[in-house]
Amino acid sequence: MEERAFNDISYEKFLREEKLMGSRCKGCGRLYVPPRPLCIECHGAEMEWVRMKGEGRLAAFTCITVPPPFMMAQGYNRKNPYCTGVVELAEGGRVDARIVGVDPTNPETIRVGMPLKVKFLHWEEDGKKETFLAFEPA
Amino acid sequence: MAKRRKLGRGVAVVGAGMSRFGMFRDRDSKDLFAEAFRDMTASVDKGLDPADIDALYLGNFSNDYFMRQSHWGPLISDLVGITPKPATRTEGACASSALAFREGVFAIASGFYDIVLVGGVEEMSKRTTEEVAEGLALATVPYEGKAGFTFPGVFGAVATAYFEKYGAGREHLMNVTIKSHENAPLNPKAQYPYTIRDMMEAKKASLEKRGIPVPEWEDEKAFLRDPKVNPVVAWPMHLYDCCPISDGASCMLLVAEEIAKNFTDEPVYLAGMGQGSGRGFHASEALTYFEATRYAAKEAYGMAGMGPEDVQFAEVHDCFSIAEIIHIEDLGFFREGEGYKAVEEGRTRLAGPKPINTSGGLKCKGHPVGATGISQLYEVWTQLRGKAGARQIPNKNLRVGAAHNLGGTGGTCTFTILERR
């Protein structure tokens, strides 16, 4: 694998390639998603990239009806809310991700603990490409 | 075991003031701070000559974003007429002025200054709700922002994790809201000085006047359950779970303990203080508490030689209803997973055994983010001096109170214990 800095730019770049990547400390083996350049366990600085299977469970969520401007630009508003949450990965660790394939107008139907699988949401605006990490019910 | 912290010399609070909080079309940061400053100088029993102030520490989160104006330290030192004395801005999101307070304490404790003005200011209401949400979201961690989390969103997610773990629900959050709104009408500086019942009756009257059928709300909870009056903002956070958008300012006069009696016969002393930092919601130890709060509390209790049972009342950072429940657990007032029961039992009411947010809290008093930390300490100071008027805690022997301030999604938390000796 090509060398990429263990930072958010690489994390985002991998997401555009439909890969959810973390960094693993070569010293103590602790895994970080999103990646960290420094191990906060053993304070080692040698990391390696690890690809996640993209499986997990919903640890916490919310359904947002008052979105920030960039989400409004994607068509979300009081009448069209979206779900976002924290996903506990099968490998351990948690990520923030959009939750799709659920009904955000009916939040009682969304359950903490539900099994999820990864999905990559590609978005293009004014020639700028972005990928949002998402999960959907498995 | 954390080292027991202590100051090089003691620090006393001899004056405190705050502006009214609210959404003010015709007022700006400077005149709000001027109001807080006048309120503070009037509170110094033996008088203050502003020329004696050695330095200013000012908390401001993001007037840069909200007002397109940065560099508020000298703007405010000029406003109150103390230039060329040094002015330093502190930023810790919603805990910005708690950090100003700490810097003021350190400056005096080190022996460098004797008399320090600490304060905070924020002017938010001239932006749209969505813009304010975006501005506040600058203080989340980047992954949260990218996933579309807003602040209500993060705390909504905290609530879902808490509900799942401890079996609490939306009705328990309403108890927090109803309790805070009981205190609010007693606070003349509050943005929303109304009880939920007041608001319910006002809504009924307004519907009647417009010839619209009035729903049968049998009590406050029925009112809060009505999605027309209390819509979802970020499930399960509804409008009445969220603090408002506010403008406001607050300030305090800190002096070295040995000169405190030159200003008042009734100084309030700093007993303990702590500050912690956190990692962002997804990476935290657990999704149902804030490590930074726990660390700050441990430091503050250690320094004061006190425990949670010694703190008779507290202001805690109830930016959202769920937050108050979590903080009163993290600060050790109630056991983990039992905060919601304590609120339900009325233990945190004004006349309860552990009054929380006698000011009405961020929910009702308002939350001009940079001003909040010192406005909380203002409430503690006011209560300790017995000057809280209608909202004075009925306990006749009030000696120890504390304030908990939280910035971001738990990235910066402080806990400050004040005492009357």
Image (cartoon, coloured by chain):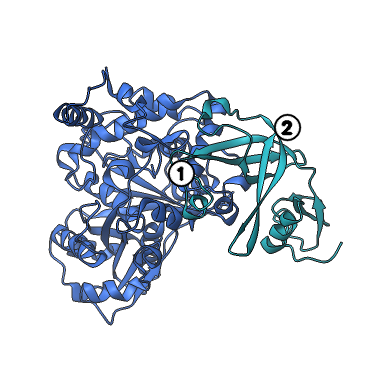
Q: Quadrant of residue B399?
A: top left
Question: Crowding at label 1, few (<14), some or many (≥20) Cα neighbours within 10 Å?
Answer: some
User: Mark 2 belongs to which subunit?
Assistant: A
Determine whether B135 is above or below B183 in the image.
Answer: below
Quadrant where the C terminus of chain A lies? top right
Q: Position of residue B124 (x, y in %)?
A: 33, 57
Q: Secondary structure at mark 1?
A: loop
User: Mark 1 belongs to which subunit?
Assistant: A
Determine whether A77 is above or below A9 in the image.
Answer: above
| Along the viewing direction, whichever of A37 and B337 lies nearer the viewer | A37
The hue of chain B in the figure is blue
Q: Label 1 vs label 2: CA separation?
A: 27 Å
Q: Secondary structure at mark 2?
A: loop
A81 left or right of B311 in image: right
A48 left or right of B413 in image: right
Determine whether B347 is above or below B358 in the image.
Answer: above
The hue of chain A in the figure is cyan
Read off the residue under disc 2: A138
Amino acid on which the number 2 mark rests in the picture: Ala
Q: Position of residue B234 (x, y in %)?
A: 46, 39
| Along the viewing direction, whichever of A122 and B218 lies nearer the viewer | A122
Question: Crowding at label 2, few (<14), some or many (≥20) Cα neighbours within 10 Å?
Answer: few
Q: Position of residue B223 (x, y in %)?
A: 30, 25
Read off the residue under disc 1: A77
Amino acid on which the number 1 mark rests in the picture: Asn
